[in-house]
Amino acid sequence: MLKILGKASSINVRKVLWTCVELNLPFQREDWGSGFRATDTPEFLALNPNAMVPVIVDGDFVLWESNTILRYLVNQYGGESLYPGAPRARAAVDQWLDWQATDLNDAWRYPFMSLVRQSPAHQDPALLAVSSAQWTARMRLLEARLQATGAYVAGDDFSIADVAIGLSLNRWRRTPLEHPELPALEAYHERLRQRPGYLEHGDNGLA
């Protein structure tokens, strides 16, 4: 059985858990990370030298990096509807997965650490204002994309890009900062709430 290493509160672990729900894929999860088993031990570092979760162990195969894990799972376990094979359709999914992992993650990191985690190292008002504006700009970009598709980030159909983006949207909605009116994002959120995996691992009270 697939083994997932990582605490259930981690946004990147939750990507993997939600994807498993979409695939009806059974798994066993072990708590690793802050507050649980340490990831800087030789045992864990042998699996992921970055000392970060999630890691999956699928038989004798070990993999880390959350978006890469999503791609592997849908390729390995019949998730063609979540990750299309046609080159252009697949490229659209990959584009938004990569955007989430780079531009969007970079934008929300400081405000999230400041306002949700209450990190003492992230309490500079000027940096908070700048980074919050950058996060809002990324969400406006996403709003424009969803206005254009009227459905999901890569087009008409739900994909693993929506797993990554959906969890990021949940983080945006739950971080206590000023949220402009973005109706396409709210409609998208309601579409995601029709999926059991999002209710269980996304819209579940965690940021």
Image (tube, rainbow, N blue to C red):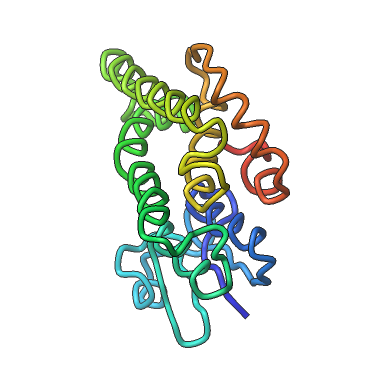
The structure residue drawn at horizontal position 64% and vertical position 72%, both measured from the top left corner, is 28
Quadrant position of residue 125: top left
The structure residue drawn at horizontal position 48% and vertical position 60%, both measured from the top left corner, is 84
Side of 22 relative to 34 (left or right): right
The structure residue drawn at horizontal position 52% and vertical position 17%, both measured from the top left corner, is 182
Image height check: is 86 above or below 174?
below
Of the pair 73 and 175, the residue shown nearer to us: 73
| Position of residue 83 measured from the top left corner of the image (x, y, whole percent) | 49, 59
| Position of residue 80 measured from the top left corner of the image (x, y, whole percent) | 54, 65
Image height check: is 203 above or below 14?
above
The structure residue drawn at horizontal position 54% and vertical position 57%, both measured from the top left corner, is 82
Quadrant position of residue 68: bottom left
Image height check: is 9 above or below 169?
below
The quadrant in which the C terminus is found is top right
| Position of residue 184 measured from the top left corner of the image (x, y, whole percent) | 55, 23
| Position of residue 169 measured from the top left corner of the image (x, y, whole percent) | 52, 33
Of the pair 178 and 32, the residue shown nearer to us: 178
Of the pair 68 and 126, the residue shown nearer to us: 68
Side of 203 relative to 51 (left or right): right
Residue at the bottom extreme of this rendering: 60
The quadrant in which the N terminus is found is bottom right
